[in-house]
């Protein structure tokens, strides 16, 4: 598997608070990487730096071997290769599910409406939402909204999908349907970086698990390495508390 994203010496502070301290991370094409850790450990900030919703203070982010933080790099183009799924869905409330999945394709990718429609329908089917194409967000449950949001991100045909705690805003009974959708996607060879507190998902689906603590990557390894044989005391303490 070839490397698709590499992060070197990434740092980010908010005021006096050093949220990311010298992060190094690489992700290979087709890999599913889960990032776990306590609230405030820097997980979501790392994800937001990868797609440049937050501008890093220092460091390098390489996409397919090119540093996207170099002056003159085409950032809008880079962002089209990253799909982002947020905690709060971020759907357009005045559009139905189908239109939500079409609009980015038409405005950003400059696809024809018919081509965008076909892609949107295929991806809504993929996430089990084809029966709800005419429904507005207000008519959908939280789990259904999140599945539409995943379908929308997929419709942009990204190289990498970023998930920022996609189940944290959901009622417990709706978490399962979203995790099932994500598990299905993980088996398609899609590159996924998932910030999650769903430990069973991280254990069952990830090729690699990253444990973050206080702004650093404290430990990383296979799911078995982290969940069965963690080496770091910090990892053991966190998992002991969570599990």
Image: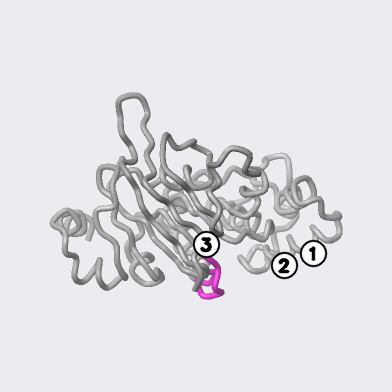
Instruction: Please rate how many residues cluster around mark 1, counting C-alpha atoms within 10 Å: few if below 14, some from 14 to 19, many from 20.
Output: some
Q: Residue at x 70, y 64 (%)?
A: 131
On the picture, is 230 further left or further right than 93? Answer: left
Q: Residue at x 29, y 52 (%)?
A: 217
Give residue 142's mark: none
Q: What is the spatial separation of the Cα atoms under label 2 and label 3, in whole angstroms?
A: 25 Å
Q: Nearer the viewer, residue 56 or 202?
A: 56
Q: Are marks 1 and 2 in contact (CB under 8 Å)?
A: yes
Residue 232: where, in percent of width, then height? 16, 59
In the rendered structure, find residue 122 and report the number of the disc placed on it. 2
188 is within the stretch colored magenta: yes
Total numbered badges shown on the rendered structure: 3
The residue that mark 3 highlights is 4
Number of the front mark, 3 or 1: 3
- Element type where label 3 sits in the image: strand
Which of the 4 image quadrants contains residue 17?
top left
Q: Earlier in the sequence, mark 3 or mark 1?
A: 3
Residue located farthest toward the left when viewing the structure as drawn = 233
In which quadrant of the rendered image does the C terminus lie?
Answer: bottom left
Relative vertical location of residue 197 with respect to residue 41 in this rendering, above or below:
below
| Residue 117, image x, y percentages | 80, 59
Residue that numbered label 1 is attached to: 118
Tell me where residue 173 sits by quadrant: bottom left
Q: CA distance from mark 3 to mark 1?
A: 28 Å
Residue 82 in the image: state x and y as whole percent. Answer: 59, 53
In the rendered image, which quarter is residue 112 located in?
bottom right
Q: Give the image location of residue 175, x and y in percent.
A: 44, 58
Q: Which color mode does the image show?
A: one colour
Range of the magenta residues? 184-191
- Cα separation between marks 1 and 2: 6 Å
* Residue occupying the point 34% across, 63% down: 209
Task: Bin the neighbour count of mark 2 within 10 Å (Cα to Cα): few under 14, some 14-19, many 20 and up.
Answer: some
């Amino acid at each position: 598997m070839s490397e698709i994203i590499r992060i070197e010496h990434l740092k980010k502070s908010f005021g006096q608070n050093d949220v990311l301290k010298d992060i190094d991370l690489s992700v290979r094409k087709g890999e599913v990487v889960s990032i776990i850790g306590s609230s405030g450990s820097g997980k979501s900030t790392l994800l937001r730096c990868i797609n440049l919703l937050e501008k890093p203070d220092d460091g390098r982010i390489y996409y397919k071997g090119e540093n996207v933080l170099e002056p003159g790099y085409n950032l809008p183009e880079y962002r089209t290769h990253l799909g982002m799924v947020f905690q709060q869905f971020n759907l357009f409330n005045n559009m139905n599910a189908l239109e939500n999945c079409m609009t980015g394709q038409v405005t950003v990718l400059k696809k024809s409406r018919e081509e965008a429609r076909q892609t949107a329908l295929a991806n809504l089917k993929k996430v089990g939402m084809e029966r709800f194409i005419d429904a507005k967000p207000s008519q959908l449950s939280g789990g259904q909204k999140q599945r539409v949001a995943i379908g929308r991100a997929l419709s942009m045909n990204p190289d990498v999908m970023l998930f920022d705690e996609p189940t944290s805003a959901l009622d417990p009974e709706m978490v399962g349907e979203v995790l099932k959708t994500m598990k299905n996607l993980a088996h398609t060879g899609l590159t996924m970086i998932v910030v999650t507190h769903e430990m069973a998902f991280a254990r069952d689906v990830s090729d690699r698990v990253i444990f973050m603590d206080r702004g650093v990557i404290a430990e990383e390894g296979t799911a078995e390495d982290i969940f069965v044989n963690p080496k770091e005391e910090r990892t053991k303490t966190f998992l002991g508390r969570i599990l």
